[in-house]
Image (cartoon, rainbow, N blue to C red):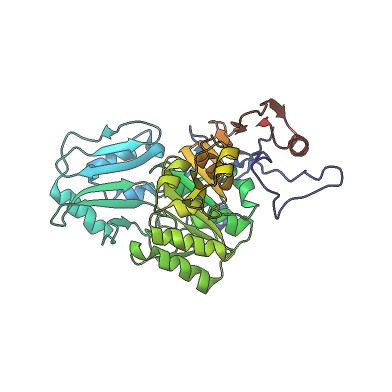
Amino acid sequence: MSVITIVSSILLPKPTSNISQSNNNPFKFKPNLSSANKKTPLALSSCRNLRISVSKASEDGFVVVEDDLHVLLEILPRDLCENLQNEPRRDKLLEVILDLGRLPEARFLGESGGQYLRNREVSVAELEEAQRALGEFGGDNRAGIEGTLHRISAIRSRKGMIVGLTCRVGRAVTGHVDMVRDLLDYGESILFLGRPGVGKTTVIREIARVLADELHKRVVIVDTSNEIGGDGDVPHAAIGGARRMQVPKPSMQHRVMIEAVENHMPEVVIVDEIGTEAEALACRSIAERGVMLIGTAHGERLENIIKNPTLADLVGGVETVTLGDDEARARGSKKSILERKASPTFPFLIEMRERNHWVMHRTERSVDMLLHGKRPLVEVRKRDNKFKYSTSTMLQRHGLVECTVSISDVGILRHINHVFRGMLIVDII
C-alpha cells in the first residue's frame, strides 16, 4: 500500500507545474510516493564519496544515512572515542559536550538529558588537542571537518581561550522532503521555523538535492557556517547538484545572498538561520526578483515572527491602522487595529514542532487571522515510525462544519475538496 502526502486545497493555490490533468478529473495529479518505497535512500549515484555505515528506518520514521561518524570521533579523547564506537545507540548520537572541568557528556536523539562518558573531567590538554585537529574557528566560533557535515562550536572565556566544545553530528537524512515534496511543485518560497536542534538544516539540505537533481532547478545555497554543504572547498555530496557559496563572515550573509542572485542566475536560493534585519530585507529583495527562497529561522510559532520586529517583514510586517467610526462599527472592533503591511516574503511557513510533527501555514491568511484575534487555519503533517503520513486540515473558523473522510484515491480527494471548497479534514490511508 502506497502512502502519499496530500495538502488540502483550502490552503493551496493551483500549482504552476508538474501537475498531470485528465479530462475526467481536472484535479487529478501525480502523487508523490513515500521514500519508504524507493530502493535507495539517496541518489547514491551522485554520492560516490559518501561513506554509509547505517541505512535503515529509525524510530523517528526516517531513513538515516550516517556519514563518516568515525571522523568526528577521532578528534575526541581516545577513551571517549572507544566508548562511543561501542555504544549501541551510536546511530542516534546527536552531539558530544566537552566542557573544561566537567564530565564529558553524550546526547542522543529523542532522549532528554545526556549520558556521561567517563568519571574523569575534561582537561585543558584535551581541549587543545581537539582544537589542533580541527584548525581555526570562524568568526561565529564554529569549525567543521573537511568532507563531512559535522559541526563543532566553541565556548570561549573572556580571554579568548576555548573552554568548551559542542561536537554536533552531521548526517545526510532522507525522508524529510516527502513531508513537503508536494509544496515544491508550486514554486513558492517556504520558511521553516523551529527551535535549535529540531532538524531545520537537515531538511533544507535534502530539499536542495531534490530541487537540483529531481526537479532540475538552478539552486544556489548561501552557506554561512558550512553547515548545509559541509566543510571544505568541495561541497558535500548530500546537496546533489546544488551549488554552494560560502560566506567569509556571518555579518556578510545578506551581501552574499544578493550576490548569488545578481551573479549566478539561480531559480532557487537556500539560506539557513535568517536572523537580522539586513537578511530579512535581502530575502524580500530576492523574492521580488522572482526567485524561490527556502529559508530557516529560530522560533516556536508564527506568532513569534509577527512579534519580532527584526523578522516580521518575512511574513509581511505589521502596522497600526486607524479606522473611521463607521468602519470600526461595521467590523465591531476598536478604531486602532493591527494590519499586515505587505505581502509575505514566504507564502508558506512551516512550524517544525518536532522532527515528525509539522504545522503548515498559508502565511498571508494565518497572519491576517492572528492580527484579527482569530485562530488560523493550519495543516498538520505527521509521520509515524513506519513512514506513514497523516495530513489533516484544522478548521478553526467559527461557523464551519468539520468532517473527516478516509480515502485512498488522490484524484477523488482533489475533486471532493473542490466541491466542498476545501472544508474537509482529510486523512490519507
Mark yes or no: residue 126 visible: yes
Instruction: Tell me if I can see residue 52 in this picture.
Output: no
Residue lying at 66% horizontally and 35% vertically, measured from the top left: 3
Q: Is residue 386 above or below residue 194?
A: above
Residue 117 is drawn in which quadrant? top left
Residue found farthest to the right: 23
The structure residue drawn at horizontal position 69% and vertical position 41%, both measured from the top left corner, is: 9
Q: Residue at x 40, y 48 (%)?
A: 308
Q: Nearer the viewer, residue 21 or 116?
A: 21
Residue pushed farthest bottom? 263
The location of residue 197, given as percent across then percent down, is: 39, 42
Which residue is depicted at the point 23% across and 44% down?
98
Say which of 148 and 313 sits in front.
Answer: 313
Q: Position of residue 357 (x, y in %)?
A: 51, 35
Q: Which percent across, then down, holds residue 389?
A: 60, 34
User: Percent position (x, y) of residue 64?
Assistant: 49, 42
**In the rendered image, which quarter contains the N terminus?**
top right
Q: Is residue 423 left or right of residue 389?
A: right
